[in-house]
Amino acid sequence: MLPLMLDLAEWPVLLVGGGPAALKRLDLLEQSGARRLAIHAPDPLPEMRARAGARLVERLPDEAEIAAARLLFVADLPEPEAARLAVLGRAHRVLVNVEDVVPLCDAYAMATVRRGQLVLAVSTEGRSPAVAARLRRQLAERYGPEWAARLDAVAALRDRLRAEGRRPAEVMAETNAWLDAQDRQETG
């Protein structure tokens, strides 16, 4: 597996499903900045209907709608229907994720902790969502909300050092020194 971060801002993304797992995927996609998100659910939960708003189409997508996507998430559908959609997606070179059906996935959603633009991610390549969830909780405890501001401060330091013409090794060393000082303040 190759872990990647995808910029979903301009990607057409299709979410199919209207139950609890699809709602979790909706959270993930919205937090990830998916602006071109279409949601198809033949029988959505009231919460999905409310959250999806005008993006909701209350039927399964047709082949043309799947072909127009670059990323397809499927959740809360019977496996034969999910498999049919996955086959269509793959035929049109769309990345496919079917909730908890590893053989139907080209891409896996990682368990993530977000602190501003800092994203910590864990994957078990679909082998154990429980392990990924446990590690995500541990990361969330270790790296609290203050890390969003730390990242912003380090990015500003990096920009300043680069503007001064510092070499990459110097930038790395000064960044590490700054982080070490922050760690000492936190523990001392």
Image (cartoon, grey):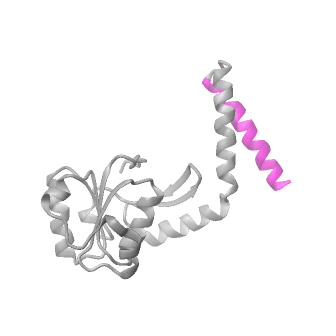
Place of residue 162 in the rendered image (x, y in percent of width and height, measured from the top left): 63, 24
Decide if residue 110 is in sight here: no
Give the vertical position of 12 relative to 98 (above or below): above
* Number of marks in the rendered image: 0
Could you tell whether 128 is left or right of 78 in the image? right
Could you tell whether 55 is left or right of 140 in the image? left
What residue is drawn where x is 80% and y is 54%?
186
Place of residue 143 in the rendered image (x, y in percent of width and height, measured from the top left): 65, 57
In the displayed orientation, state which residue is furthest to the right: 188
Q: Magenta includes 172?
A: yes
> Main SS type for the magenta part?
helix
State the residue in front, 47 or 71. 47
What residue is drawn where x is 67% and y is 39%?
154
Give the quadrant of residue 13.
bottom left
What residue is drawn where x is 67% and y is 52%?
147
What residue is drawn where x is 50% and y is 60%?
112
State the residue in front, 29 or 84. 29
Give the quadrant of residue 75.
bottom left
Place of residue 115 in the rendered image (x, y in percent of width and height, measured from the top left): 60, 55
Give the quadrant of residue 60.
bottom left
- The span picked out in magenta is 168-188
Q: Magenta includes 58?
A: no
